[in-house]
Image (cartoon, rainbow, N blue to C red):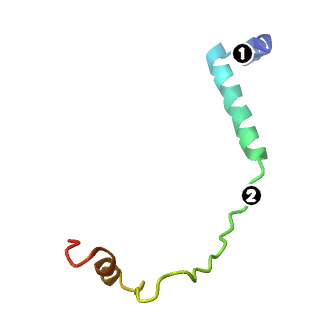
Amino acid sequence: MLERVKEESRKRGEPFKKTLNDLLRLAVSIEKASLPVKPFKVRPFQNTGYNPGFNFDCIGELLDQLEGPFRR
């Protein structure tokens, strides 16, 4: 493998390090492009187990009920 990179470097007329970096970038980009991407799906959750008497519409009231009036 090393000899192939050296040969490619000579063909391009570039330094070995630049050729190696270019080939590595190319390999990584090909690998990323070929990976299948699974679509993200949001699954809704039905929450029916909350305690009655708590108002989840007003955060301030909820904090007062849970932590008391001295929460600030």
Q: Sort mark 2 into few (<14), some (14-19) or many (20+) by Cα contacts within 10 Å.
A: few
Per the image, the residue denoted by label 2 is: 38
**Is 4 situated above or below 58?**
above
Q: Sort mark 1 into few (<14), some (14-19) or many (20+) by Cα contacts within 10 Å.
A: some
Q: Residue at x 78, y 51 (%)?
A: 36
Closer-to-camera residue (57/16)? 57
Q: Quadrant of residue 60?
A: bottom left
Disc 2 from disc 1: Cα separation: 38 Å
User: Where residue 72 sits: x, y (%)?
Assistant: 20, 71
Closer-to-camera residue (40/64)? 64
Q: Looking at this rendering, what residue extends furthest in the bottom direction? A: 53
Which label is found at residue 24?
none
Q: Residue at x 72, y 43 (%)?
A: 32
Per the image, the residue denoted by label 1 is: 9
Judge depth for marks 2 and 1 and give the one in front: 2
User: Where residue 9 sits: x, y (%)?
Assistant: 72, 15
Marks 2 and 1 close (CB-CB < 8 Å): no
Q: Which of the two discs, 2 and 1, labels the residue nearer the N terminus?
A: 1
Q: Residue at x 62, y 80 (%)?
A: 46
User: Where residue 1 sits: x, y (%)?
Assistant: 79, 15
**Is 7 situated above or below 57?**
above
Judge from the rendering whether residue 41 lies leftward or rightward of residue 70; answer left or right: right
Q: Residue at x 23, y 72 (%)?
A: 71
Q: Secondary structure at mark 2?
A: loop
